[in-house]
Image: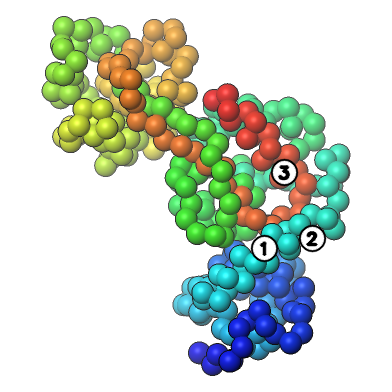
Amino acid sequence: MMPEAPRHADAAPHPADLNLLRTFLTVYRAGSFTAAAPLLGLSQPTVTTQIRTLERQTGRELFERLPRGVAPTPVADELATRIAAPLDVLARATTSTSPEDSDAEPVHLAGPAELLCTRVLPGLAPLVADGVRLRVTTGLTDPLLDDLRAGRHDLLIATTRPRGRTVTAVPLMDEEFVLVAAPVWADRLKEQPAADVPAALHSVPLVTYAEDLPIARRYWRHVFGKRLTCRAAVTVPDLRGVLAAVTAGAGFTVLPRYLCLGELASGALVPLHETDDPPINTGYLVQRPGGTENPHVARVRDHLLQIGRTW
């Protein structure tokens, strides 16, 4: 542990080198020297040396070295808060921002497969036609968020709001959940009072996203005020597969309304319970601040925020 100097970190006698601050901020956001190195175009030993130099200049330890990566100290949190915005502005001011730059790197976009395939990619088609290149990765929010912090993605659509200061997240869309089944099952439940729907569904196969029934359990708790005790008849880790199975008559499920709008409009699926207070989940558009000099990232981000209002 480096001993603390009697002065505060921001009272250094000479201004810190901008390159050292840039390296510090990249390490802070990436979570490790190793992940920061390729983002900076430096070797890992060089990154380590620069951080040690900055620590000597400030007289404070900035990172706690862990078996895997580093953890920022409170001094690092304060420093990052003070320098992030100015350094990001400086990076943008010294980078070409012409959207017509044909040499721009692809925009690396990540998020849930269902939303990306049914809403995001069709919505971004005009940008692709205008020269934007995309590289898309699908998956769950937590591992994708780790990859974003490590510099593997530029933008992420997250199903929960990320914590911490290493990324920026803004609300993108609200998804409303609906309890649905094919008409053959809905007809059997027509005579049931609304309060008896949960009990009646015990005899209907449940099709769900995962064995622990995360979406259905939330619906039951929020709408019916009780615990879901059904077991899944079918699990498939893609809501499009859940949609296909239920539309074909496999049973009932809970889906985001945006995903089954066409089936609801055509009558291929029927709501089993109408409520004025459905469960709502907010999706967030997440970006690692200052993580890229690619001007197309801003184009994709701004376009998503614009079209997300219509979803």
When asked about the image quadrant of residue 92, the answer is bottom right
Residue 77 appears in view: yes
Looking at the rendered image, the quarter that the C terminus falls into is top right
Q: What separation in Å lies between label 1 and label 2 (alpha carbons)?
A: 10 Å
Relative to 113, is 72 above or below?
below
Which residue occupies 73% across, 62% down? 86
Residue 55 appears in view: no
Count of numbered tags: 3
197 or 205: which is nearer to us? 197
Residue at image mark 1: 84
Residue type at numbered disc 1 = Ala
Discs 3/1, front: 1
Residue 146 image offset from top left, x and y in percent = 51, 57
In the image, taking residue 42 as reference, residue 232 lies left or right, namely left
Residue at image mark 2: 90
Upstream in the sequence, badge 2 or badge 3? 2
Q: What separation in Å lies between label 3 and label 1 (alpha carbons)?
A: 17 Å
In the image, taking residue 8 as reference, residue 65 lies left or right, namely left
Any mark on residue 287, and which? none
Q: Tell me the element at label 2.
A: helix
Q: Residues within 10 Å of mark 1 (few under 14, many from 20)?
A: some
Residue 1 image offset from top left, x and y in percent = 50, 90
Residue at image mark 3: 298
Discs 2/3, front: 2
Which residue occupies 73% across, 63% down? 87
Q: Tell me the element at label 1.
A: helix
Relative to 246, is 40 above or below?
below
Relative to 161, is 216 above or below?
above
